[in-house]
Image: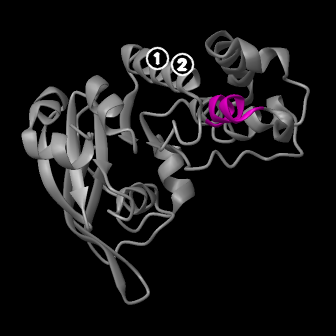
Amino acid sequence: MLEVAGLTSHYGRIQALQGIDVRVGEGELVAIVGANGAGKTTLLRTISGVQAASAGSVRFAGQDITHMPPHGRVRLGICQVPEGRQVFGPLAVEDNLKLGAFTRPGHEIEAQLAGIYRLFPGLGDKRAEPAGTLSGGQQQMLSIGRAIMARPKLLLLDEPSMGLAPLLVEEIFRTIVALKAEGTTILLVEQNAHAALAIADRGYVLETGRVSFEDTGAALLGNDRVRAAYLGL
């Protein structure tokens, strides 16, 4: 579904990605792990079009989208849940969710909302409240729900467990597993490498803008170098 080849990206003179090759098959859950500053978020931003590619290519379902604007990628089915949640605080929870469905026909929105409230019952209870009054965990669920409203073919998740209590982290990861079980293709960037690789079909380890390891999630969990460098084992 997704093929990233030789991808580079810069912030001014600083090269953040240095020839990244990543692929994601339909229905897969692929994890990207690595230390802070490794280029994980930049990779997602470049795939979604928020960050410009300097060289290389991004292909989605066989189509070259390297220079396509972000809104065009959303219409193709690529949706990103950004790091730090970034909900629209003054707007009601339900209005935040509806904003995620701007590419969908109007008659689908109510059914989509009902599906989100089944997935996250707590959001249904607070649908009329400003999103800024939600807890961090609820805002993360809202951010994921907003992306799902677009019925993504590829869901990009950037650090979904960041800043959450352990019980909420478990709930977020259960949700990610449930979304995969429903057929959603997922590319997951996550600081919690152990949790991410434990649920991933395959994984990539990034170091200073390069892929240093690529294997199944289980194999990376058992790799002594990965365990020592990223899992604290």
Give the image quarter of residue 18. Answer: bottom left
The residue under label 2 is 171
Q: Residue at x 59, y 29 (%)?
A: 165
Above or below 204: residue 65: below
Q: Are marks 1 and 2 in contact (CB under 8 Å)?
A: yes
Q: Residue at x 52, y 27 (%)?
A: 169
Disc 2 is placed on an element classified as: helix
Q: Amino acid at mark 2?
A: Glu
For the C terminus, the image quarter is top left
Callout 2 crowding tier (Cα within 10 Å): few <14, some 14–19, many ≥20: some
From mark 1 to mark 2, how far is it between C-alphas?
Answer: 5 Å
Judge from the rendering whether residue 17 lies leftward or rightward of residue 97; answer left or right.
Answer: left
> Farthest residue in the front direction?
233
Colour approach in the figure = one colour
Q: Which mark is residue 114?
A: none
Judge from the rendering whether residue 73 lies leftward or rightward of residue 111; answer left or right.
Answer: left
Front in this rendered view, residue 156 or 102: 156
Front in this rendered view, residue 85 or 92: 85
Which residues lie in the magenta part?
135-143
Disc 1 is placed on an element classified as: helix
Judge from the rendering whether residue 89 lies leftward or rightward of residue 36; answer left or right.
Answer: right
Q: Residue at x 25, y 46 (%)?
A: 230
Front in this rendered view, residue 61 or 128: 128
Give the image quarter of residue 66. Answer: bottom left
For the N terminus, the image quarter is top left
- Does the segment drawn in magenta span residue 137? yes
